[in-house]
Image: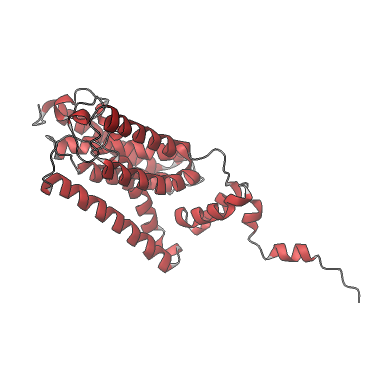
Amino acid sequence: MDFEPVDDDAESQQGEPEVQGNCKACSGCQKFHLTVSKWMLPEHSRDTYLERANCIPPPIFIILISIAEVAVFIYYAYWMTDKQLITLDEGIWNSPFTYRPDKRQEAWRFSSYMLVYAGVQHILGNVFLQLLLGIQLELVHKGLRVGLVYIAGVIAGSLASSIFDPLIALVGASGGVYALIGGYFMNVIVNFDKMIPLFGVFRLLSIVAIVGTDVGFALYRRFLSNAVGHSVSFVAHIGGGLAGMTIGYVVFSSYNQSLVKDPRFWICIVAYVVCFLFAVLFNIFLSPAS
């Protein structure tokens, strides 16, 4: 009986995951993309992601928004003040970017406040979180979707603050950061049964620890700190988180699917628009800051 010769290379390739062989990323990035797929996607979507994974284009949105925030912070910290890095001083308070209740008729402030920060610890925390989570999300979902969730969180944060903490100023991109966290958190919850249990628990505990620490610090800065300077609202964390747990969840759970064909997306958009209009009317007619 004749036997066909066995190709040792072919046999060794059979032991390798096929998706890694089809990955479009450079060889140095393949392991990174494999790790990203495990953190960001349920198991049934990972093969598709790895087949399409590419290092080009890089996650431009989250990197550019982080550079813009750092650049504005450096400008106000070094050129507009006496190198004050800790408290919200008059330079930032008088910035055209800062959301101020008495200036809320300047509508751009409801989004531009994300560019200014109350101090070095504030910007370091936010930029670290948005780069840590945002780069991975953007590699998977691309800049348009991540940008949609981020900006929705920024606007939701300022509108929520204008209603529930109406006399307090607002700075920092916590609304956008918490929108990313909220969307990711909901996907971890929904897909928990598809994960290795220990891995899923670790992700949940990591999110809870990060959010708990950051919100605790924000509450301390808002109510207990005796530091010199103006108070800063913490409500943007909650508003951004809720935007992420609705719009962000739908966007991040629809990998490789069209959002316009997903009824959940339109339900979230309608709910968001209703809340947006309510907040606008509240600010015009009912706000105690008037």
- State the image coordinates of residue 2 (x, y, percent, origin top left): 91, 73
Q: Residue most toward the right?
A: 1
Q: Quadrant of the N terminus?
A: bottom right
Q: Is residue 179 above or below residue 97?
A: below
* Closer to the camera in the image, 93 or 261: 93
Residue furthest out toward the bottom: 1
Q: Where is residue 70, by image quadrant?
A: top left
Q: How many marks?
A: 0
Q: Is residue 194 above or below residue 64?
A: below
Q: Is 266 positioned to the left or the right of 255 in the image?
A: left
- Could you tell me residue 41's position as x and y percent? 47, 54
Q: Could you say where residue 130 lies in the image, as x and y percent from the top left?
A: 37, 44
Residue name at image x 40 percent, y 63 percent? 200
Residue name at image x 51 percent, y 56 percent: 35
- Quadrant for the C terminus in the image: top left
Q: Nearer the viewer, residue 255 or 90?
A: 90
Colouring scheme, one of rainbow, by chain, secondary structure, one colour: secondary structure
Q: Which quadrant of the structure image shows residue 264?
A: top left
* Depth order, front residue of 217/271: 217
Whether residue 277 sits left or right of residue 225 in the image: it is right
Residue 236 in view here: yes
Q: Residue furthest top?
A: 106
- The residue located at (12%, 39%) in the rendering is 228
Observer able to see residue 144: no
Image spot of residue 21 (x, y percent): 66, 54
